Image (cartoon, grey):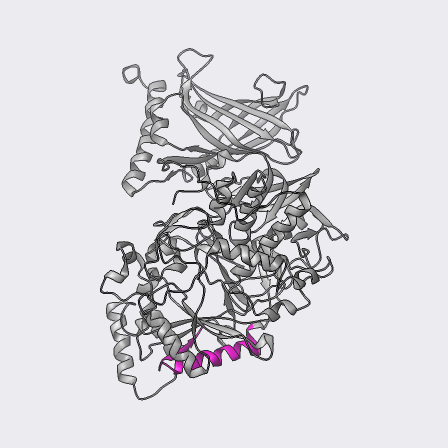
Amino acid sequence: MQGLSQPLTALEGQYDAIVIGSGYGGGVAASRLARMGFRVAVLERGREYLPGEFPDTALEAARAFQATSRLGQVGDRAGLFDLHVSDDISVLVGCGLGGTSLINANVSLQPDPRVFDDPVWPAALRAEAGSGALAEGFRRAEAMLQPTRYPEDWPSLAKFESLKTSGRAMGTEAERVPINVRFESGPNAAGVEQAACTLCGDCCSGCNIGAKNTTAMNYLADAVAHGAQVFCGVAVDHVSQSGARWCVHWTMTEGARGRLADAPLHIHADRVVLAAGALGSTRVLLRSREEGLGLSPELGARFSGNGDVLGFGYNNDVAINGIGQGEWAMGGDPRGHDRPPVGPTIVGAIDRRDRPERDDGMIIEEGAIPGALAGLLPAVMAAAAAGLGEDTDSGDWAPERLRELVSLLRGGHHGAVAHTQTYLVMSHDGADGRLALDGGRLAIHWPQVGHRPQFESVAKALRAATAATGGTYVPNPVWTDLMDKALITVHPLGGCPMGESAGSGVVDGDCRVFDGLGGVHDGLFVCDGSVLPRSVGVNPLFTISAVAERAMMRLAQAEGRALDTDAPTPTLPARAPAPIGLRFTEKMAGQMTPAGSTTPVDCHFVATITMPNAQAFFADRDAAAEMTATLVAPWVSERAMAAVDGRFRLFSRHPEVPGARAMEYSMPLVTGDGRAVLFVGRKTLRDDPGFDVWADTTTLSCRIIDGHDPGGAVLATGTLGIAIPDFIRQLSTMEVLHAPSVAARLKTMGGFARLFGGHLVAAYGPDGLR
């Protein structure tokens, strides 16, 4: 599959619609808005991964990990595995183009119909659960996601056979569940060619085969085929009203701009769809409220972990083969090798949702742990079993210890760990948690949630499931008395819940955001798991997708737009592989004097300069690099001004000084109220008496011009420079893009050093070296 995202320099200042986030809700919104004929931009905080680029070793997984807690943030801000740590319940979500669809187990099940009987749902939506727009939403989502069950004629999978044994012992037969995985090669519903599953078991670290139906494979591809633009590395801070339009304030997660104290950039749209997930969308709206946007007092309410429980049946008497193949999986099809197949992360479930009381129901699914973690599991699992485990059988101490030793000596694909079942359970939890900002960080407040009787019921069921195969039941290590029965979820819901009015919800049944004054904000929507006002008791992706499909149907009706979701997807425009590029970020500060004044005023900019094709840039003296920048000039705009299509020339021929070289900056900017201005600047490099290399390379003579025409009226003139601490930080922002190897990365960095140094020697060196 080819990439979908574009460089940030292609981002325009105004769109018909902006979609923030790219998971199930964002994918649906992007596809449907583009099919309505709108000019759409999709903004994703993480990066784009293509099959073969997901982490498959422990080191790669560690590099792709980020965590946020009350102590701060660690790891790459664009890391694939995004953990939010809280005292009461922690949350793991995906960060990348496709959102959590990149790392989930892709199960597509509808909730127990009784879930929609709960009056927390808006009445109109409740009425459509069995038929009408919501039922049509499920149909449309199914047509695009194409869920299917693991084929009967494919290899038997030990982890599912073990679950069947557990189900029979518990009185509920385990059954295959529909999963968004392809079991034959060919084009999907969006016309994207996908490979067949190889049974590697690494769904939850990202599918390197391309068999998993993530939103990047279908909804987002469909959006791009209909003209949408996709941009990665964009972290949205808040939204605000700008006349009749919406202003989206964002920063880059790539390019290390934060090291130079960057101000947010901004773009405008007539419609904004928040789809950053329960945590992301809620945080954006909380920040927006801090900035003055009127919203419902229910913002942050009805948070749910969807009753998620993680548990293990360790060191069973039967083989499970529930550890993914990791880097070994890239060698081909496991069905043709000696190592037994793992299968998709989830194949089957013990469905116990038919309890007399709806909220007593649960569904128990078997799982697979990504192979990237295989080397860590023998010691970790043995320690957890010794400290927390409950052996469900007796008389087999010796063979259990022998299997444990085999794992410790040979690794996680052998012995006790290879005999370990992973259980993933969804149930109900009351959905009465609360999200709030704590010093800018999103905090989850839900005291004692893990002490609720439902979680003891789940633990009892998992003991019974493990006893059927003679293993040691090991609960989630954080669900202990020592950790005050803390929970962890991969299915966060709520925070922007639906309601009949602003008194009971943040959005209405059509996902329109309440303004807190009795109406809705025109053009502002939330379409993701945050709008679900309660747990759904099963993997929520299908419900999220259906609710988003319904919201897009309503939007099309309201705006008089045709929305044909059954029309074939056009062929994606072909793109050449990205060449090796180079990027760095620079900060310059100083003073400029407004026209008609004699008093200079402080001014600064932060610019990320990108050479998409480094070798071509090195070879062409007049080549222009791309530049994304923010300029702070309060006398022109109260807000920082944003430029996403600036140009930078390095050592070009000076247009006015014979024999001199120039560094030239050009930034078409947009003010906070939408006014166009142009920033142009030039560093002049020539050898004058004395040592002037530092002054020449760090001093920028500049102008701000009214409009984007260089011949327009001059609003201000001045001089900016680089402070030594900022220069040191600037060096740390240099990075090579799309390099296939360390050698290629070093070669590119060396090429830039030779280019820069060579021009300096030519300009300032002794005559014999020029």
In this picture, residue 360 sits left or right of residue 121: left
Examine the image and state in which quarter residue 597 appears: top right
Segment colored magenta: 450-477
Image quadrant where one finds the N terminus: top left
**Residue under the point 71% across and 58% down:** 297
Q: Position of residue 290 (x, y in %)?
A: 67, 49
Residue situated furthest left in the rendering: 338
Residue placed farthest to the top in the image?
A: 658
Task: Look at the image and say whether residue 472 sits in the magenta stretch.
Answer: yes
- Look at the image and tell me in which quarter the C terminus lies: top left
Residue at 64% across, 46% down:
556
Percent across and percent down for residue 687 are 39, 16
Report if residue 383 lies within the magenta region. Answer: no
Report whether 682 appears left or right of 199: right
Of 539 and 617, the residue lying toward us? 539
Residue 491 visible (yes or no): yes
Residue at image location 47% in from the left, 12% down from the top: 656
- Residue 479 picture location, percent across and down: 49, 73
Q: In front here: 584 or 381?
A: 381
Which SS type dominates the magenta stretch?
A: helix
Q: Is residue 213 above or below residue 600?
A: below
Q: Along the line of sight, which residue is nearer the eye, 320 or 622?
A: 320
Measured as percent of width and height from the top left, residue 658 is found at 42, 10
Residue 414, quarter of the rendered image: bottom left
Check the image and name the residue furthest to the right: 518
